[in-house]
Image: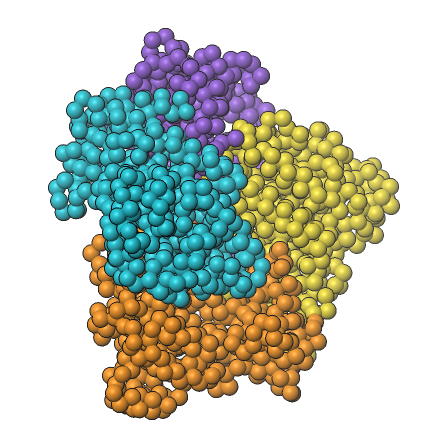
Chain colours: A cyan, B orange, C yellow, D purple
Amino acid sequence: MPPVTGRTYLAIPGPSVIPERVLNAMHRVSPNIYQGDIIDITHRALDGLKQLAGTRHHVAIYIANGHGGWEAAITNMFSRGDKALGVGTGLFGVNWARTAQSMGVEIELLDFGRTAADPARIEAALRADTERKIKWVTLTQVDTASSVRNDVAAVRASIDAAGHPALLAVDAIASLGCDELRMDDWGIDLIVGASQKGLMLPPGLALLWLSDKALEAARIADLATPYWSVLPRIGADEYWRLFGGTPPTQHIYGLDEVLKMILVEEGLEDTWARHRVLARAIWTAFDAWGAGGSGIALNVRDPGARGHSVTAATIPGGGAGRLRAWLEQEAGVTLGIGLGMAMSHEPQYADYLRIGHMGHVNAHMVMGVLGTMEAGMCALGIPHGAGAVEAAARALSAA
Amino acid sequence: MPPVTGRTYLAIPGPSVIPERVLNAMHRVSPNIYQGDIIDITHRALDGLKQLAGTRHHVAIYIANGHGGWEAAITNMFSRGDKALGVGTGLFGVNWARTAQSMGVEIELLDFGRTAADPARIEAALRADTERKIKWVTLTQVDTASSVRNDVAAVRASIDAAGHPALLAVDAIASLGCDELRMDDWGIDLIVGASQKGLMLPPGLALLWLSDKALEAARIADLATPYWSVLPRIGADEYWRLFGGTPPTQHIYGLDEVLKMILVEEGLEDTWARHRVLARAIWTAFDAWGAGGSGIALNVRDPGARGHSVTAATIPGGGAGRLRAWLEQEAGVTLGIGLGMAMSHEPQYADYLRIGHMGHVNAHMVMGVLGTMEAGMCALGIPHGAGAVEAAARALSAA
Amino acid sequence: MPPVTGRTYLAIPGPSVIPERVLNAMHRVSPNIYQGDIIDITHRALDGLKQLAGTRHHVAIYIANGHGGWEAAITNMFSRGDKALGVGTGLFGVNWARTAQSMGVEIELLDFGRTAADPARIEAALRADTERKIKWVTLTQVDTASSVRNDVAAVRASIDAAGHPALLAVDAIASLGCDELRMDDWGIDLIVGASQKGLMLPPGLALLWLSDKALEAARIADLATPYWSVLPRIGADEYWRLFGGTPPTQHIYGLDEVLKMILVEEGLEDTWARHRVLARAIWTAFDAWGAGGSGIALNVRDPGARGHSVTAATIPGGGAGRLRAWLEQEAGVTLGIGLGMAMSHEPQYADYLRIGHMGHVNAHMVMGVLGTMEAGMCALGIPHGAGAVEAAARALSAA
Amino acid sequence: MPPVTGRTYLAIPGPSVIPERVLNAMHRVSPNIYQGDIIDITHRALDGLKQLAGTRHHVAIYIANGHGGWEAAITNMFSRGDKALGVGTGLFGVNWARTAQSMGVEIELLDFGRTAADPARIEAALRADTERKIKWVTLTQVDTASSVRNDVAAVRASIDAAGHPALLAVDAIASLGCDELRMDDWGIDLIVGASQKGLMLPPGLALLWLSDKALEAARIADLATPYWSVLPRIGADEYWRLFGGTPPTQHIYGLDEVLKMILVEEGLEDTWARHRVLARAIWTAFDAWGAGGSGIALNVRDPGARGHSVTAATIPGGGAGRLRAWLEQEAGVTLGIGLGMAMSHEPQYADYLRIGHMGHVNAHMVMGVLGTMEAGMCALGIPHGAGAVEAAARALSAA
């Protein structure tokens, strides 16, 4: 149990910290849903979502979680028997592909383990598809489990280099609002997002962006069902059709507030920059902690392949598990469990952890995590290199 | 636009009024989702949901709206090509059957228009199904569009009388927590519910209850998808599997509070009784307004076939539409539009309205609606019988 | 105990219903109080308060309740041994004068009981003060206990007609934001207000407006103490001095929201008009209930002398007390106790009640009170005239 | 302006961080104030307040800020012309005495500057008062300006050692709920507190505890006024008299929640212990920063004389001011200004700052402050000793 007093910080990779003003915006009775403000607010939010993803094309909001978002994507992308190239760089990339497979899609899986995708191998796989059976390439921008960040534009370039007509679908659930994302510029055809990470909202919304080509593809995708089909939602005349039924009114109030914060007040580029600065401070601390053979290490070696919203790391000898427990009980900080490296009943499960640093996060919150991690390692006798927190402070100060 | 000042009352048949304490319970940052309170609260809420529906069997919570709930039900009930007897007593009953049809289910539709289902005709239809192809009978308990309330136990009896093995699925979205509902006693196999009506929550949750038989049926239903399949959710070991992904943490806090209000503090039987008393006051007023040839009338003639959470009515000559506008602008009351009688571009559309009186509702709120409707009819010169509000007050006083 | 479910309506003459958006505005952590937004918001609120009272002169905010506001006023008005003419038209008018008396002020009390002040008698009293010892005339605009409303401009005129230099101090606690109030136009020198009535805020703020003359008087008033003295607060350079210490930060957020609602969105004249319309509907109902010798009656016979934010009435035979209890238990409505006519241990105490209709109030709320009062009188067998609620509805419809 | 995104931390010595659950508890419409829950809750809160101060005697709640609390104390302690020994160990101790002086009390000021009171000098002063004219000794437990903490029990002992009948009044505004406080055991006769520091509430309440002797003294104190007099409040039969008028209903809801957190959930001894541990971590960091001639230093040299809720320090060369600005703009942290060492227009004003670590504070919050201070000093080129944050982490880990 966390301590009673003192503000706790949920530093897991989603759900993330909800800003006070967003909780306030959602603290409203339900509105008239036939006419009035909620309709204007919804359309403003839809416009904002397009801006967020860097597109002038289409977006739909579903009442669902991220896994529901996967299903919304899959049903609008595929007919039973269609083929896709699934790119895996962590548990979630693999699972999205497997979800499609379980729904009747033939999946060719390119699994890069817990490292970034190699565009050359994607190009090769597409060149090998001489019959052009592959309809879509699926990719996670940042895999929440491994914290690997893929170079989406490079993947697009590899598809083009192969001269292959496959469309590109990106799971941006863990990166949306944190990492640079330019749907139109980068040639992305479909993006899946969700509310509870960089968007700083409670769980409850899945988001789907589509290019014109993706919308065309949706017209023939026979996996579509009335709830998941994006077609009646895009440009719906009747308000309720935007949501295939009752609108998520309170979440929409919150979404509107969040988009105002990101797009109007902080600015999207500055939001991305803030995540980069804070992530680097964390990486710097891990580099110092890992010195001297402590075995503490980040999962992703290449800084250019690290997500800026989540960091997966190892503290050997069960240190990660013990540290997580200490932080929750003594410091008011909850770190994420490791995911994808070991099952919870295996001893090495306790060697992994993840830190969420997405959305409503700043220098105070991150330095507080690093400072209390240092304290916890001292308290628990976990071997670690010296000077980590101050190195992180210097990294921050240089930003 | 409603007036700025004075507490507005959203008297539409969902979303309904959210209690202050429920909004407060939801006004929380997200919790640790790996362990801790949220898990206990969720299991308490699942137990409470069973009690709410009168069952000792199974329940699952989906992040979805009611239309998503329909799809959760359909995908767990059917394989492509299965046959069902769809019972229609209003727009929603018909649409649920049509949704199944669009997903590959063969539907025999028994449409009773805007009157209650006749069990004898259901029995006859099942007797005629000599090959026992009909797997399920689908029924709305209260149709939100027509405000018709069906006698669910009688429908069950008609299935049994026909000696037919069909399972019984009930859409209780508009009646849950308002009208008597006894899943096990009445022999219901599946119930669909949602959060935003009698449950007094924001939109965002769909609910699915299943009998043992329904769970067996779900094991072979090939429409199931990873998100909708109830199988991994029932009795899941890992917390996230209860929700097929990220849990709806804030809604669960609210659900727990709502169930405490209904089951512990007011008591479920008293909750039903309250809805009956308030509905009768409204009906009494309409009887008086309708006297003397005003043409004002309730949609459902038979009081025994009226839902206690929503009331559909006619005020001819466009009176319903004008009254709705007056109430919103002058009195802070939003009534529901008529649904299922006319399209919004047709002139007679303005002859219909609905009043929601579900969930967080009491004598003050209902008498305020009737009193301001009286004022509005006076202001607009809508012909109406005298003494309606006082007749309603007497009806209340007799309760 | 009120029922668990259904929105309750606290229809007492303060504290009043707080708008949802005001509670939200106050639902904030404390801000930097050295610089930043809170300072701008405070100055905007101070400007708004001047507009609310109709003055271009001075205003100060105290952390205190209304009784504290009285003391703030008295200490800035008087030196020990000063003389005042206290005008009583109900319990509060008398008590304000007595409070001053207990602090060393000589009071000449003109007590009009529970009827409006007669300006001619005030003029006569001032003419009789040939030595001009009377420094101030104190008056309640609307006495919360009797619901009497005094004609403030006429009282001012009576002072002028007497050629007397006395300043005029008005307790507007129960009328502020409800009844027309024009400080400068009406020649008022000091007004006391509070947050929890027409201002729709939680209790916690007392407000003091002063004319230039009153500010001059404050400079020599020797009852002043460091906390109550208005002098360091008016035009303070340092932010904390505006409040004689720590500022009431959350109340200021709420006050800013309330002033936006009244002054910007609804408009002050429309706010007054709304209170007039709603009060007349209530009076109309009482007229009908009182017909036929039921003994039900308003305290103030002359409609021109009735406050528009509170109504004091009699229901004989203990009917008021029984009705109050029924409304709280059965209908979710809390009416106010009678004040000033009997002590709580006396039997006739139960013959009196008051209805608060101040601030965040609209037609739905008022008609709900009248409709449930009708139901309660029926349930309890309280004799009452017929047609009251419909008469009130017609009164509303004519507005 | 602070950054838009990321949770800000107001680390000033009051108002302090309000827990989310306390804001929620206060997010309620106003209740029936004649009967019902609010009355029970109030009496539970009054009992809790006694437990908080370690007394079985008397307590009263005022709607006021801390300066109002001073006045409540003074008016109940003194008659005009009475004499007191005022002990000053910082700006607030001196100002409380001066406030009494301005209200007609003769003050003998023992000013210890920004160091702790020397009981021997107090004893000597009382021995010198051979006519026993001194009625009260006034003392701050922790002076918010200097962060000096006085040994209250030792001061009591010095009074006793002098054989002097003077009563002992303690201003615990900055220490209440943070530093050990035992009214009865330590022989304190009167304590002043307020809501917005260790009590984690919004500003708005002043608190006054009295021993039996102090209550006797209040019966003859002629400075008392109707609002400030504690006599009608203690043991009042009528609810409103507890507050001298309208009760601070929303603050009472919050107070009840806060007392549950401190007294029931964390435990008062553990609350004090938490403040000690966190304060020591901060002191440890300052010791390291101050090494090597940087000039960075705590105001109070003697750790035994430091308050555990606020820390006053120097960063020379204007470093304190520049660091405060950097932290607010770059890190989401607001530190307090220095108070009592220089006026805001003087250059050395920027050499001082204070850190609030009172109430809702934990290791994450404190380490976040230290880590971002480190970053800020790096960014601004402020000379400082090395290893401060890690030394603080080790101090924490040893606790």
Residues B87 and C268: in front is: B87
Q: Quadrant of the N terminus of chain B?
A: bottom right
Residue D357 location, quadrant: top left
Residue B27 placement (x, y as % from top left) = 42, 50
Q: Is residue B222 left or right of A202 when viewed as pictured?
A: left
Residue B383: image quadrant is: bottom right
> Looking at the image, which residue is at 39% across and 18% down?
D378
- Expressed as whole percent of the image width and height from the top left, the position of residue C272 reads 70, 55
Q: Position of residue B334 (x, y in %)?
A: 57, 66
> In this orientation, does residue B377 appear?
yes
Is C253 rendered above or below residue D297? Answer: below
Q: Is residue D278 left or right of residue D13?
A: left
Residue pictured at 57% horizontal, 40% vertical = C252
Would you say D77 lies left or right of A338 here?
right
What's the residue at 27%, 72% (across, down)? B79
> In the displayed image of the protein, which residue is found farthest to the left?
A347
Question: From what the image shows, is residue D115 above or below residue D166?
Answer: above
Foreground of the two, C44 or A212: A212
Q: From the top left corner, tell me how far across and down residue C97 is, in percent.
A: 68, 45
- The answer to whether any part of residue C13 appears in the image is no
